[in-house]
Image (cartoon, coloured by chain):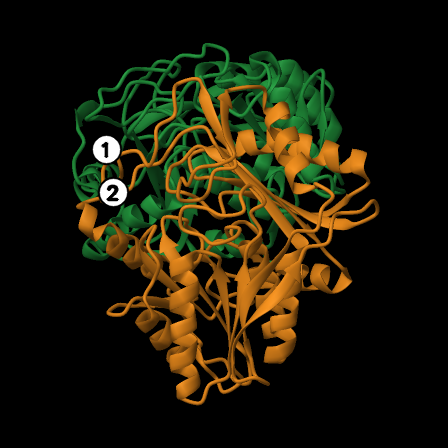
Chain colours: A orange, B green
């Protein structure tokens, strides 16, 4: 295993120390339990937006802590859910009296632990809503997931919901917005190579020298199928076909109900893309694929959107939700309305996304 | 060879088409000859700042075309110098009557071709200065270079000089500033893995499974030495020691002299770093190393700067000057004064660097 690291068991600590040193104007890192929080938190009258999940997907989520995005992020060990304790302590640190929105990727451990953390916070009088992101159209169930996995739409949701929180949206409106973003967003990934977790020192799965995997998850979970390496345009076509498939996939997602004072199953169904829709196109590196190749992918994504009458009104191209050094990419399309575009354009200042400030 | 590409011979075209599609608000791409230029060029009364070099180092240079940075970039084939023709046509496209500053990385082909292009532009009445960047302290001569190679300081020079051009600096003052940045900047790189050029389909060099190379160039040129993989802190210490070595390395760099109406050799000598100096610290991925590992590296860079009394006043962390998908990193320290900090902070809007707008 060749990585820029010291010992496998202090990798995360070193990276978080580096993040804190580099961006002390934006954020601080608390250890035992571990969470990253805005230096100016709690921000008066603002709903606190929190996310988290296993590490190894950087800059997600710690790189999105700052003005106009997250108030706190809770990093677990690599590819391991953070604990309710981390989430609860982060919540207490950044709660400003206006409630908390947890943005949760749909992995069994994350969902369960964010629920427990929400219950703990609620017991201390905070208002808390959890919204689950399950945008990965590749699979219906997966290794760590009941239902779809949560991937690229999470980044877009954190930006848009973060801007809305900054603009003073109330908790219920923020939850509605985040739910809508999840339903409007669809993603699919692919891998050219596996990644190696520092703890194991071994590739997360095996791929032959001429093989790729379509529909891979961000922890190397199995995808839809393996195939020989083929031209990028054909790979992009297959991914875009799955993303734009004209079906509504109905499922239930767990949310908190203030009325029923309990967790309930909410029916969710994502509307298909239609000619004339405005979209944000997000082409993401899995970590080891250089940005030059992403632009080659983007060219084909844009061509297909043109053909289907989808208008790309904004784009994001780069390594934003990764699997350590895995080579490959994911594509996310998010259908957006004027409100979402305005919130996307709003100023943001975080380690990984920065504009308008 | 597994890459997201179609055919090896249309890789660059596809990537440039993608860049143009994604950032049509900022830039356009001209083919035959190939150059990337600001959509609003020529910008009235502004010195045009141009750079270029072999492709494979993205986002350098095309990703830095836009407001507050480059007016044009000339990409050669992968790891191959662009031609004088490309540079001359780019110059004609973006020249606004106030002259041209070419920022040239110190590779023999680049230096020679930018000289020819400058002569061609001068023959058409344009004022042109070329400033060479040779900041790589690893080696005194290299595979494609007489003298030091030009690496990370190029990115910082393009930002700072670009901002100065935007602020109305005249050509001679811009050239002085760019020369000073080169002398104040020192870099060193290392590789965990080689990269594969699409044309050859083969690794650019061989490294054993437990071997790294210190002092590598951005085309995989041989470095200072190979060693077994060791803790990142030790690697960073070795690189920082070379960067901060208390010597003045004197060499001659080719520049145009208006007085002598000819190219002359100018003696150049980089001042050492001293306690109390302000620096920009730039930790760069060679392409395949994820940002998480860069933060681990940054932690140690910051620690060493603290010990030496260097104050990191700004930082840049990410993949900004790469070798396709090579794993590894480079470190650049640039000694800065208040003028350079102010220009660093000035608004910039390009595909790869964006703030304040």
Towards the viewer: A27 or A264: A264
Q: Circle 2: is it few (<14), some (14-19), or many (20+) Cα within 10 Å?
A: many
Please tell me which residue is depicted at 75% across the width and 38% down the height of the picture.
A305
Please tell me which residue is depicted at 45% across the width and 54% down the height of the picture.
A60
Query: Which numbered disc covers residue A198?
Result: 2
Which chain is mark 2 on?
A: A
User: Does B292 sit left or right of A158 as displayed?
Assistant: left
Label 2's element? loop
Towards the viewer: B166 or A149: A149
Please tell me which residue is depicted at 62% across the width and 80% down the height of the picture.
A170
Q: Quadrant of the N terminus of chain B?
A: top left
User: Does A132 sit left or right of A198 as displayed?
Assistant: right
User: Does A135 sit left or right of B181 as displayed?
Assistant: right
Please tell me which residue is depicted at 22% across the width and 44% down the height of the picture.
A199
Which chain is mark 1 on?
A: A
User: Does B176 sit left or right of A161 as displayed?
Assistant: left
Label 1's element? loop
| Picture coordinates of residue B186, whole percent (x, y) | 33, 37
Towards the viewer: B224 or B153: B224
Say whether marks 1 and 2 touch (CB < 8 Å).
yes
Instruction: Tell how many labels.
Output: 2
Residue A138 seen by the camera: yes
Query: Which numbered disc covers residue A1?
Result: 1
């Amino acid at each position: 295993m060749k990585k820029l690291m010291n010992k496998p068991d202090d990798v995360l600590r070193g990276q978080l120390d580096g993040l804190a040193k580099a961006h002390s104007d934006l954020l601080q890192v608390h250890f035992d339990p571990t969470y990253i929080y805005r230096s100016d938190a709690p921000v008066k009258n603002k709903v606190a937006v929190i996310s988290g999940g296993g590490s190894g997907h950087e800059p997600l989520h710690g790189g999105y802590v700052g003005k106009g995005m997250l108030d706190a992020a809770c990093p677990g060990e690599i590819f391991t859910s953070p604990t309710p304790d981390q989430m609860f302590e982060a919540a207490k640190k950044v709660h400003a009296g206006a409630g908390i929105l947890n943005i949760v990727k749909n992995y069994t451990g994350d969902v369960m632990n964010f629920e427990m953390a929400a219950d703990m916070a609620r017991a201390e009088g905070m208002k808390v809503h959890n919204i689950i992101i399950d945008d990965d159209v590749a699979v219906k169930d997966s290794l760590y997931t009941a239902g779809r996995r949560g991937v690229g739409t999470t980044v877009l949701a954190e930006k848009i919901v973060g801007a809305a929180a900054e603009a003073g949206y109330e908790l219920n409106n923020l939850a509605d917005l985040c739910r809508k973003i999840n339903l409007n967003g669809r993603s699919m990934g692919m891998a050219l190579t596996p990644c190696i977790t520092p703890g194991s020192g071994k590739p997360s799965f095996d791929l032959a020298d001429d093989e790729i995997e379509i529909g891979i998850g961000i922890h190397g979970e199995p995808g839809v199928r393996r195939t020989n390496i083929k031209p990028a345009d054909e790979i992009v076509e297959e991914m875009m076909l799955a993303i734009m498939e004209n079906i509504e996939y109905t499922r239930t997602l767990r949310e908190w109900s203030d009325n029923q004072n309990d967790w309930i199953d909410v029916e969710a169904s994502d509307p298909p893309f239609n000619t004339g829709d405005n979209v944000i196109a997000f082409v993401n590196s899995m970590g080891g694929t250089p940005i030059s190749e992403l632009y080659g992918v983007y060219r084909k994504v844009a061509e297909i959107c043109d053909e289907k009458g989808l208008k790309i009104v904004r784009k994001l191209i780069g390594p934003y939700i990764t699997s350590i050094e895995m080579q490959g990419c994911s594509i996310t399309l998010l259908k957006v309305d004027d409100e979402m575009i305005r919130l996307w354009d709003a100023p943001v200042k975080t380690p990984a996304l920065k504009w308008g400030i």
